[in-house]
Image (tube, rainbow, N blue to C red):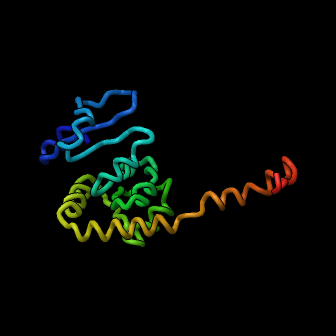
Amino acid sequence: MRATWWGAVGLALAAACMPGPKPPEPLKPVRFLLINDVYVADTLGELGLFYRLAPVAFVGKSLVRGGGQNPLEAAQLGCPVLFGPHMENFEELAAGLLRAGGARRVADGAELAAAVALLLENRAARAQMATCARAAAASQGGALEATLGALAPLLERTLGPVDAGA
């Protein structure tokens, strides 16, 4: 969505972008953090800060075909999660968040705007959704242990037995 759309609905917009093609319109730098309503983050390693500060998060690449982005970090940090219909890359995780009440799937930009407005206006609904998001994310724990457990036999066959005392 272009910056003028946000202005038309009365929201101030800021962006943190990685180097690359410039947006179609100049966006205010993030240093104006306290006076903006909407932040577009396209940077590595900074989303945790945004999720901690945001009352609600929209997961990108999900309104258009692109598979969506990972909603887990937002959910882990207790941020209500909104995403579009295209979460193919994270469908199982998205479905779990939906079942738990920690996320909401929106069909398009208009439904996204309505969902954001509802959550911003209704503190109790936002808090409930945040609690559900955090609980759903906590139930996803153990991925590292499961991955290491699956890799252990392969590594042992390739590298030999591991000496636990070493």
Instruction: Give the residue drawn at x 26%, y 52%.
Output: 109
Furthest residue toward front: 165
Residue 4: quarter of image: top left
Picture coordinates of residue 17 (x, y %)?
35, 34
Observer able to see residue 61: no
* 143 w.r.t. 100: above or below: above
Instruction: Give the residue drawn at x 20%, y 47%.
Output: 37
Q: In this rendering, would 150 be left or right of 59?
A: right
Residue nearest the viewer, comparing 148 with 90: 148
Picture coordinates of residue 47 (x, y %)?
39, 46
Instruction: Give the residue drawn at x 27%, y 36%.
Output: 30
Q: In this rendering, would 9 be left or right of 158?
A: left
Placement of the N terminus among the 4 image quadrants: top left
Picture coordinates of residue 28 (x, y %)?
22, 33
* 136 w.r.t. 148: above or below: below
Instruction: Give the residue drawn at x 27%, y 44%.
Output: 39
Residue nearest the viewer, comparing 21 with 46: 46
Q: How many marks?
A: 0
Observer able to see residue 109: yes
* 118 w.r.t. 13: above or below: below
Residue nearest the viewer, comparing 152 with 62: 152
Residue 149: quarter of image: bottom right
Furthest residue toward right: 160
Picture coordinates of residue 146 (x, y %)?
66, 61
